[in-house]
Image (tube, helix red, strand yellow):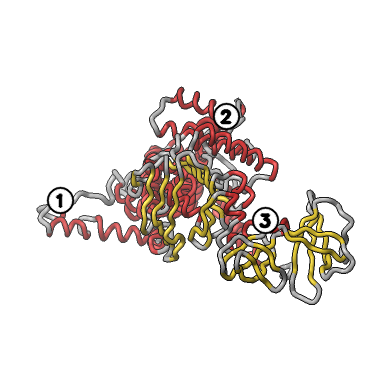
Amino acid sequence: MELEIRNISVSLSNKEILKSINLTVENGEFISLLGASGCGKSTLLKTIAGIIKQREGSILLGGKVLDRLPPHKRRTVIVFQDFRLFPHMTLAENISFPLKMMGVNKSECRKRAIELLKKVKLEGYEDRFVDEISGGQKQRVALARALAADPVVLLLDEPFSSLDVNLRKDMRELVLDLQKEYKITTILVTHDQEEALAMSDRIAFMYNGEILQYDKPENIFNNPVNTIVADYFSEGTYISGEIRDRRFISDFFNISANKDNGRYKCLIRPAALKVSKANDSDFEVVAKVYQGDNYLLKINKKDSNLKLESILNEPLDIEEGDKVTIELDKDKLIFIPE
Amino acid sequence: MNKKTPYILIMPIVLLGVLFIYGLVNGIIQSFGYIPAFDLRDFTLDYYVKVIKSPTFLDSLKLTLQISLISSILSAVLGTILTAALVYTGHTEGKALQIIKLAILIPHTIVALFSISILSQNGLLARLFYKLGLIDAQTDFPLLLYTKNNIGIILGYLWKEVPFVAYFSLSLMASINKTLGEAAENLGASRLKSFFYITLPLSMPAIGKAFLIILTFSFGAYDLPFLLGATVPKALPVQAHIEYIHPDLRHRPYAMAMNGLILLITWIMAGIYYLVTNSKKIKGDNHERS
């Protein structure tokens, strides 16, 4: 079902947390709310679920206004960051809980709980208690319980943040598989840009209670609307300059750019810079940092403040102190209007 | 911090502990009839046997159990309702909490005076009912104090124990409601269902402990039954006090035997509570393993 958020503003303890948020999520779409801690993404999720009341604005689900509907009637189910499983119930009872609230009989509840446990690869765990399972297993149970509630919108509040890296990858795959199978409109709250890029159909980047950009992962990564969005995905070096007649002109370089005339900042991310060894260059490698799959080279230009970074995929014979020439990949340069 | 500082800081509690244990052991020894100062030097169970066989003791025991059980059950129920009301209206700190603390701070003797000035036939309520024409004379106001139904004593206990239960369980219930109660509502439970299925069962350990504390306290307390109780039968602690202040000092072992029995019954209550809560845990463990 399509979810529409219209001009939502939320204040908590007289502090404005959300400022006129507008967002539309298509039926069956998977979107991410991405941003740093405290930007308001979890507040927006809880507002959608009806746990936090908005000061103004409306939430529409399938064209129907939800504003006056209490949380238990919304079917906008959250998988909480801290799981919030009920410790006095078995896993089957936890998963059965929303079914029990719907009036489903006991045997049907158990049957459905066992089916869902199988879906999240926890077959045979139905009679265990919450304190008998690991963090990753708790996450799976929380997901199964949310699915049992037959949600119209599934809200995932940083569900993978407490899991280790390997488990996180497995859980991401499981969530995506289940989301595709059940075709549920899903909103993921995360501060992990890689997670958002890998999982989402669209990403809403939030900053200071506002959505700065809402776009497909490729677009938001390659065409950030401002330096805040750009820096969140990957930092780099900004060069100020001007575009005139499809050409970017700066103190350091001139390069063709398919943009309208005006003042711009050119963002040079490490991936946009290629280096090769040369003895008569102004650029010097000041650090070479091993990153597992590649090396990060930190390069300074002689007699200027210009500092650049480059990724070295091959273990080339470039070491700290070496002089290098640089080559810009113009397709990977990002121009942000000033 | 000086190495000696922790030992100095712990001294007051150690001294109090020593005094408490000395009094307890001394009382138990005296209950067996050994008080050399009164020329009683034989260890015997006779005083216990005589106390247990006395019809006054059985009446007093029955009365004391009745008062403590009724007041504690009512306090636990009303205290839980008060806690839930505070949690669901968002009054878990600030003024509401101060009012609750104030009610707990007022001593039982003052509560007894309040009860007399409000609930007696010369009290505030009787006068109000008479002024409003609801009763023909102040003496028509129902007798609540000094009666065999002990309503006055029970109301006196409720005054302090209802806020005590609320204060004791408030923070736990508030935190459960904020996290798991919120999750339950998000999963389709109404506020009422969320309370009965999640918040209340998970708050029961705190409510149960508060119940045990007020049950054992009211079973051994002397002041309210003494000030508001009927002439006969008297509550067990009152009966023990009467024996204690008997002009014949050789009656002292009877008082101590009664205190010994109060102590024993209190321990039995605590033991039953422990067994009941522990058996629940064991059942849970078995369930987990099946």
Which circle marks residue A119 in the picture?
A: 2
Question: SS of the residue at dot 1?
Answer: helix
Residue B237 seen from this side: no
Could you say which is closer to the camera, residue B58 or residue B172?
A: B172
Q: Which residue is mark 1?
A: B140
Q: What's under tag 3, amino acid-wise? A: Asp
Question: SS of the residue at dot 3?
Answer: helix
Within 10 Å of the Cα at label 1, are there few (<14), some (14-19), or many (20+) other Cα atoms?
few
Q: What's under tag 2, amino acid-wise? A: Lys
Residue B27 seen from this side: yes
Q: Which residue is mark 3?
A: A331
Could you say which is closer to the camera, residue A127 or residue B82?
A: A127
Q: Nearer the viewer, mark 3 or mark 1?
A: 3
Residue lying farthest to the front in this orientation: A245
Left or right: B194 as drawn, with respect to B230:
right
Image spot of residue A320 (x, y percent): 87, 64
Could you say which is closer to the camera, residue B238 or residue A8?
A: A8
Q: Nearer the viewer, mark 1 or mark 2?
A: 2
C-alpha span from label 1 to label 2: 72 Å
Image spot of residue B176 (x, y percent): 48, 47
Chain of the residue under the numbered disc 3 shown in the image = A
Identified at 48% across, 40% down, the residue is A185
Chain of the residue under the numbered disc 2 shown in the image = A
